[in-house]
Image (cartoon, helix red, strand yellow):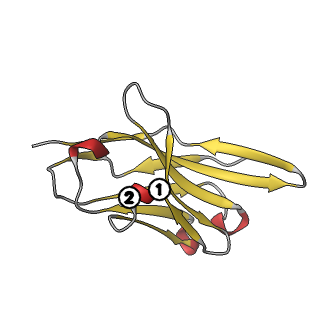
Amino acid sequence: QVQLVESGGGLVQPGGSLTLSCAASRSIFSINVMGWYRQAPGKQRDLVAAITSGGNTDYADSLKGRFTISRDIAKNTVNLHMNSLKPEDTAVYYCNAKHHVGVLEYDYWGQGTQVTVSS
């Protein structure tokens, strides 16, 4: 079991920056993949960025260069740094953990944090 708690969402003006944090209830080094997804009203939940236990990162193509995922293993946190924010970045952002046990994959989600980009 992994509990995930997101923080850092809020209202930001276009062009601004925001950092989201996800605190995990266990060592993130033992979790295969940690990631951030987002879901705008009426749309599906899409991958924003992910980081593996080995430190490899992956990003949605449209967000490369503006968003950066990082982790603090000592604090069991994964962060999403968002720059040059646009109104279309407005969404609920969810933290995700994918943990493999043998051939089984377990998916865990946080409760989500709202990010609103508006002037």
- The residue pinned by badge 2 equals 63
**Looking at numbered disc 2 in the image, what kind of residue is underneath it?**
Leu
* Left or right: residue 112 compared with residue 87: right
CA gap between label 2 and label 1 equals 5 Å
Please name the residue shown 27% across and 42% down the image: 88
Q: Quadrant of residue 16?
A: bottom left
Q: Which mark is residue 60?
A: 1
Secondary structure, mark 1, is loop
Q: Quadrant of residue 108?
A: top right
Q: Are marks 2 and 1 in contact (CB under 8 Å)?
A: yes
Please name the residue shown 65% across and 60% down the image: 33
Q: Which mark is residue 89?
A: none
* x and y percentages locating residue 63 in the rendered image: 38, 58
* Left or right: residue 4 compared with residue 113: right
* x and y percentages locating residue 102 in the rendered image: 90, 55
Alpha-carbon neighbours of circle 2 within 10 Å: few (<14), some, or many (≥20)?
some
**Looking at numbered disc 1 in the image, what kind of residue is underneath it?**
Ala
